[in-house]
Image (cartoon, rainbow, N blue to C red):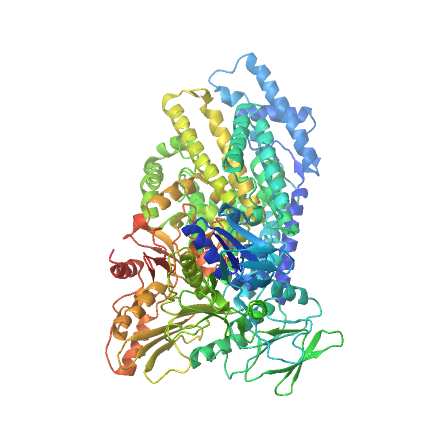
Amino acid sequence: MHIIQKIGLGIFIIALALFTLSLGMGKYQLSADSLDISKEYHKKEILEKAKVNGLLDKRYDSNFAFISDLKKTLVDAQQSLEEKAKDGIPEGVYEWDFRMGNTKDYMFGVVKSASVGPIAQNPIRWFMLTFGLGILGGLLYILPKFISLPGIKNNAIYHNSLTRGLQFNIRSIFLGLTIVGTIIYGIFYMNHNLLWPAITAAMVGLISWLVFFRQGSKENNPQRSASPDITGWLGVMTGIYLIGFYILLYWMPEYITSWVVMVNPLSLSLSGNGASQWFLYGTLYTIIVLVMGIRMMSKYRHNVYQVVRTCSVMFFQTAIAFLLPEILVRLNQPYYDFKNIWPLNYSFFFDYNLDTLTNSGGLGLFMLVWGLALMIIGVPLFTYFFGKRWYCSWVCGCGGLAETMGDPFRQLSDKSLRAWKYERYIIHGVLLFAVVMTLMVLYTYFTGNYQVLIFNSDSVRTWYGFLIGSAFAGVVGTGFYPLMGNRTWCRFGCPLAGYIGLVQRFKSRFRITTNGNQCISCGNCSTYCEMGIDVRAYAQRGQDIVRSSCVGCGVCSAVCPRGVLRLENSSIDVDTRTDALRALHIKDGEVTLMQ
Amino acid sequence: MHIAIIGNGISGITAARFIRKLSDHKITVISAETDYFFSRTAIMYAYMGHMRKEDLKPYEDWFWEKNRIDLKRGFVSKIDSQNKQLVFKEGANMGYDKLIIACGSTPNKFGWPGQDLDRVQGMYSMQDLDGMEAASDKNLKRAVIVGGGLIGIEMAEMFHSRHIPVTFLVREDLYWNAVLPTEESKMVSKHIVENGIDLRLETELKEIIDDGTGTACAAITNKGERIDCQFVGLTAGVHPNIGFIKESAPEIEVGKGILVDEKLETSVKDIYAIGDCAQLRNPNEGRRPIEAVWYTGKMMGETVAYTVCGKPQAYNPTIWFNSAKFVDIEYQVYGTVLAKAPENHTSIYWEHPEGRKSIRIVYDNKTSEIVGFNLMGIRYRHEVCEKWLKEKTSVETVLQNLGLANFDPEFYKEYETEVVKIYNQQTGKNLQLKQKRSLTAALKFLRKAVGV
């Protein structure tokens, strides 16, 4: 390792340690001035209860103690308002401005506004010490890679504890715990409504039964699923860290206010508003895509396709997903990510989004039409011309993260036939769920009726957001990078990928061409396919690759040592793309190429 | 009918797969090396940490049972062709109705003193991979590789990937220049050096020194230099692995390899030989009797499957092609490109200023027919080149349509215009490139060939 790289790694570790430790550095003091709540009755009641409970103006050195006392105060305030509501709500006041719904809604905001510690006093300094040093360390580690000769550099990936993956049974433990944990937490999340957690558990059982027993893959050796012998513990630790991050981000943001406070100045300068946990996430996400995008370019700089593609995901994440929506907010327009498409953008048809777009004048209507047009015309059209890659590995934010931060983990995708069976059921199941949920939500929007058959459309949509939007896309989607590869969400879960994939499979000019008989079955293509496609199985028999899951990242072609694979488009054989076996084969008494 | 196949390499396995496609015969594949088929050409990637050993297996383990291909681990010590029995070293016999021998090659050793010491080996088998892995310990300060061929450079790259210093002894004055034309040889030689590998040209191994414990500790070159090292890789080519046949089945006629006719049948009825171990009695014009490469093994496997299933086929490998990768430089060849060009061959050679890409097009200067393509760091379409070569297309037609052959990834710069320019300079003509890289055009061109 280059000396500069060692220094960079050191700086990065320091930054990561500071970032992590900063969570425990917050000091909290709730004061009447700092409490930022717009609903007067709520604010008054909370302040009063805070006073009664001795919370007001008391300085806390630990967020656990503060949050626990605050919880009590919020519950007290809620109950007190309920009591008062029995006596009648003041005239001219809406019920929801008087009664407090979920106390959790106030938790994050109050904790953030009560932050008074060193980070709150000097957020920019702390931003530089964590984000800034992290970027510096990362770049110092990455930039010397540009000195080495260009070419495929996959040396020691399977010798490295971070990127080696894990043993099959340890992976199974992670998967099992995640599924069980999600369902149990989901029961609490749904306020002890067991219907949806029970349906989910039944679906897990059904899919496992279909794959394991009905299709007889029980005995199949999981050799291509995970590491056979050794587990990369650094990877496991990284996975746990990421999973922990997502759990805090989605469900306990009050514990990460230190981080949110750090990005507050940036948020103020962009949108004029204070930062939420989502702004923190967006900032972190964009920085990682940019820094790791530079790493991607250092690794594949001999490959123009990879360089252009990486620039594209860096651009779309930074400009379209991160900056533009913040600027729109500053201009008093709706927050809108122009490249996000239903059903990945599952809240597009939610009442609040439709209301916002239809009430925001010309631009809002344009956003509505744009979103519909992308979904109905854009997806099939672009996919017909360029394949799924136009979105998944060139534009999409999830894809952007997977192709940059996720690149070191692409080899960990499961290539077994069994994984493919799971994939088909799960991804199309999620697509179906997204469609049904959206139809119910729209039914409610247009009729005002929440009851759809036996289901409540509001709880369907809450459950979808929890299970698919947060647990699957976030916790598993990124948390599992070092455990099951960088496209776990895209491959098994993303409903948009499912939709685009169907178009790619049945009507597209795109395919990966196999170059005649040149394949030596080495397996680099399969190993580095992030979508777990057994590319070699096609290449070695001279068949072109047309798979709904292929995101067209082009890495199979890049790592092929014999120049066998090429991503390309042609309209003259759209319906017969997979027919030609290009390897030498005997037919009717002669050895021929092609049919 | 029971068809036994000795060897689970690419030839034997291809034969087994195609026999299953064509018939319901009982198939047994025997190997002393591994339980399952693996890609021999990918061994290096397991050592370098690009892949796991498991990833070398092109088929999942359940594949064989599902396709009713029995795998047997064992070493055949004797073939009793009279009684159609195989005798295993471990004991026990196995009857067969037809036998396919696909037992591959074994690395050459030229009687160097010390060639059988510990930490001296070739790179061919799974056991060789394990040997290299075991030898790559703290004591390994330098490895010496002997023999400037494809395996030699792979072995050098393997050690280099683990930051183990390598000295690479090459007998010729440039790397692999018995096969590559001078310019390409120079390019690869330069590339080896720029990777930090200690390349010694015109240097041969004279002796390997024993450290007193039966382990190699130094190599002496023919120039008298002593190179301290803790590993010596012997990669001076391979020869057919027919030792056990010579001893146990003298009725099977052998030369350097097992002699076979055009149906790949040996001198004994119902015994066939394919792949590296087979020697063709009458090879096609311009082809060698033994071609120890992946692709010919694959073609032989398919051909012999038809023959044993009652649809006899003559082995016809058609146009020569091959490929390799020299550290970071990919190499493809189609047709005939000779290191020492005969008088009637003229080359059009273009090289990128950075010296890691080149295109060579060889044609017959008497007839103007295209003869071969040699590509470094550039990918060409197999089928397009093959069609041009088969049809003996004129070099000018090829040059004007050269984009049809380009198989580089999208956005890659195309250099076909440069090639045409060089032809124009050489001949004083004014040819223009008419066709750029295009799948649609290539498909149209190829479909005309098969009348679709």
Q: Nearer the viewer, residue B93 or B110?
A: B93
Q: Residue furthest bottom?
A: B223
Which of the 4 image quarters holds residue A277? top right
Residue farthest front in this picture: B82
Q: Is residue A267 left or right of residue A355?
A: right
Q: Specify whether residue B174 is in view.
A: yes
Residue A224 image position (x, y, % from top left) = 55, 49
Up-down relation of residue B264 to residue B70 (above or below):
below
Residue nearest the viewer, comparing A232 with A139: A232
Quarter of the view holding residue B422: bottom left
Q: Identify the residue at image location x=41%, y=20%.
A: A449
Q: In what quadrant of the picture does the N terminus of chain A appear?
A: bottom right
Say if residue A276 shows up in the picture: no
Where is residue A45 shown, x and y percent of the image? 60, 23
Q: Residue at x 53, y 30 (%)?
A: A200
Residue A161 percent across, percent down from the top left: 64, 54
